[in-house]
Amino acid sequence: METLSVHKWTKRHELQCARAWVVAAAAIVSVGAVHAQTDPFLGQLMPIANSFCPKGWVVANGQTMSIAQNQALFALLGTTYGGNGASTFAVPDLRGRVAVHEGQGPGLSPLTRGQTLGQEEIRLSASNMPEHSHSQTFSASTSVATHSAPASGRQLAHAQNAGIYADAGGAATTWAAGNTGVTGSGAPLDIRNPITVITWCIATTGTFPPRP
């Protein structure tokens, strides 16, 4: 009888330990799932590799939202990213844009939340180029001239029977008109960094973030 009682107690103890372990494991999984997936902070951004956002999230593409249906999120975002402030507000638009922190970094320009700037490409102008020069050449000939010079508005040659020295002073005259050769097509220059496109989502449900 005594041996049997000890055996029963041992089995009962093992069963209780097993149950406690299962409950603890379930609690750990449940807490991890809540904090990682089902209970984000309102306004939290999340990148995701698929083409849609999960329930409780919307695509961060600048879309307008109803204030009446998203009062808590509106309390966080306001009209920082758009909307009329009376019935609608907008979420951030991350299409083709990189998110950076607000403020002023060392040696950088100040940035405010919701500000957008930058461009994908630029067209270079003369003001963007360093100082430089262009060479120009003229063809000469040893053949006997057949026309009098100078021609109208051109002063590269002297008139027939003229002296070899020009008179001092006088009004400035135009030299031979002409242009150097034109090159280039004015195509814009792409200044984007290499990127990989994914889907950005923003949480519309979840915990209202407490202030520190």
Image (cartoon, rainbow, N blue to C red):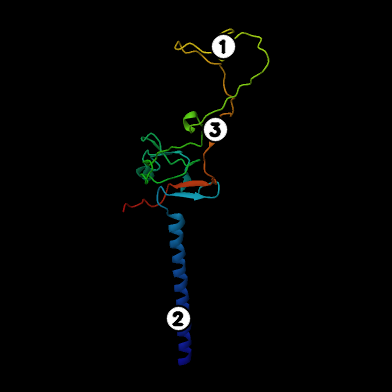
Density class for disc 1 (Cα within 10 Å; few <14, some 14-19, many ≥20) is some
Tell me where residue 69 appears, x and y as whole percent: 40, 42
Is residue 54 at all visible to an observer of this figure? no
**Distance between the alpha carbons at the discs numbered 1 and 2:** 122 Å
Identify residue type, mark 1: His
Which mark is nearer the camera, 3 or 1? 1
Looking at the image, is mark 1 or mark 2 earlier in the sequence? 2
Tell me where residue 78 appears, x and y as whole percent: 36, 40
Which mark is nearer the camera, 3 or 2? 3
Looking at the image, is mark 3 or mark 1 earlier in the sequence? 1
Identify residue type, mark 3: Pro
Residue 13's tag is: 2
Q: Secondary structure at mark 3?
A: loop
Identify residue type, mark 2: His
**Distance between the alpha carbons at the discs numbered 3 and 2:** 77 Å
140 left or right, relative to 23: right
Return the residue found at the far right.
143
Is residue 115 at all visible to an observer of this figure? yes
Tell me where residue 66 appears, x and y as whole percent: 41, 39
Tell me where residue 211 appears, x and y as whole percent: 32, 51
Label 1 with label 2: CB-CB less than 8 Å: no
Q: Secondary structure at mark 2?
A: helix
Is 65 located above or below residue 141 in the figure? below
Residue 158 vs residue 92, the one in the foreground: 158
Residue 188's tag is: 3
Residue 96 vs residue 178, the one in the foreground: 178
The residue located at (67%, 18%) in the rendering is 142
Residue 56's tag is: none
> So how many labels did they put on this image?
3
Q: Which residue position holds label 1?
A: 158
The residue located at (48%, 89%) in the rendering is 4
